[in-house]
Amino acid sequence: MSTASRDFRLLLLGQTTSQLGAQVSAVAIPLLAVVTLHASPLQLGLVTASGTVAFALIGLPAGAWLDRVRRRPVLVAADLVRAALLVTIPVSALLGALSIAQLVLVSLLTGVARVFFDVGYQSYLPSVAGPDLLKGNAAMETIRAGGQLAGPGLGGWATTIVGAANVVLVQAAAFAVSAGSLLAIAAREPAVPPAAAGSGMARQIREGLAFVARARVLRALLVTSAAGNLSFGVASAAGFVFMVRTLGLPPAAIGAVLALGSITVMLGAAITPFLARRYGSARIVWLCLAVTGPAGLLTPLATPGWGVALLVLGTAAGELGQIVYAITSVTLRQRLCPDRLLGRVNATMRCFVTGIFPAGALLGGVLAEAAGVRAALWTAAVIILLSPLPTWRALHGLRDIEQTQL
């Protein structure tokens, strides 16, 4: 096995464990808030929003700073910080001191670490994946989808057996394993050019913002991605309340529903290279959302009993479209952006795209309390239905990434 292949496998190992842990706790923490701490939809919205608000607060300077330093040490530090923070949840639960306020604080601080990891990771991947970025991104998403498939089922089952607070330990351990796998990668990152390391932070941030603002394709991807995250934020505040209180599903059943829906995530990640060859690597960016978006309207129609199948179908179709879009849109961005700007461009995109999630979560909580959880889910479905329009306008008539100009 070549060194490059070994390094990429180590990167896959780290992401496998990290994503599995993240998906397990994605079930455990909302259930901990709803079932154990009796959170209202608005409180649940605060918990979920606090995990991503850091992108809006520090995303841009984080991207500029990451273009000044080697990225792997930052990724390792971010994993270790998140592991330490998550351990505090089961400790507080054991002492009888856990509260909604602590869940919000831990989500906020792990969100800060996530900013540095996510921005740095998307900038670090091209140096490990090699020239075939589409296959590299697809492989990473296939592994991530495996975590999505197994994680919710394990999370729901484990929550039933040992309690949601203890399940959070799984994610803490996963982040520690991820840090270890990153440390084991042999390839050394190239030194940062002195000019980049010495540039003013404000000027670097402006340069990244200006690059995205001038690039028609990047602007379109930003709007489409932001709409998707807004929709997900709205649904996140109402989804678990909908499944627990409207559909009457126990934790294990919720895990099973999410796991069944996630089968299409793994499938979508695996077949993305084929879809890109068949329909075009640029065309599939918007086409995948246009085809799967209408199925999202099934989710708010779900009812107790066999009507839960509508929730599964809507979730599965939505995840299929989103995973194909995520792989192809990130590959498009990595291909078109120069490496010296990649950290800032990634940060600019993540700042606006992920930064809108808290607004969606809070909006979803307010809508759910004022008009009911179904109203919030209908709002999320309509947003995702309209989301591919900007990208379609920017890429209409183009088949492949090689034909695309920023």
Image (spheres, helix red, strand yellow):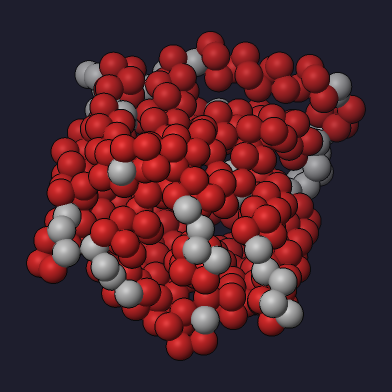
Spot occupied by residue 132 in the image (x, y as percentages of width and height): 44, 48
Spot occupied by residue 227 in the image (x, y as percentages of width and height): 39, 31
Q: Is residue 199 above or below residue 36?
A: above
Residue at the bottom extreme of this rendering: 161
Query: Number of marks in the image?
Result: 0
Image-quadrant location for residue 4: bottom right
Image-quadrant location for residue 216: top left
- x 60%, y 49%: residue: 51
| Camera-side residue of 361 and 345 | 361
Spot occupied by residue 98 in the image (x, y as percentages of width and height): 67, 69
- x 53%, y 50%: residue: 43
Residue 354, can we see it? no
| Side of 363 relative to 295 (left or right) | right
Image-quadrant location for residue 392: top left
| Camera-side residue of 265 and 197 | 265
Q: Is residue 21 above or below residue 348?
A: below
Residue at the left extreme of this rendering: 306
Spot occupied by residue 200 in the image (x, y as percentages of width and height): 86, 22
Residue 398, can we see it? yes
Q: Is residue 206 above or below residue 14?
A: above
| Side of 145 relative to 164 (left or right) | left
- x 69%, y 82%: residue: 94
| Side of 158 relative to 265 (left or right) | right
Instruction: Name the image quarter holding the N terminus.
Output: bottom right
Q: Is residue 229 above or below residue 336?
A: below
- x 52%, y 81%: residue: 163
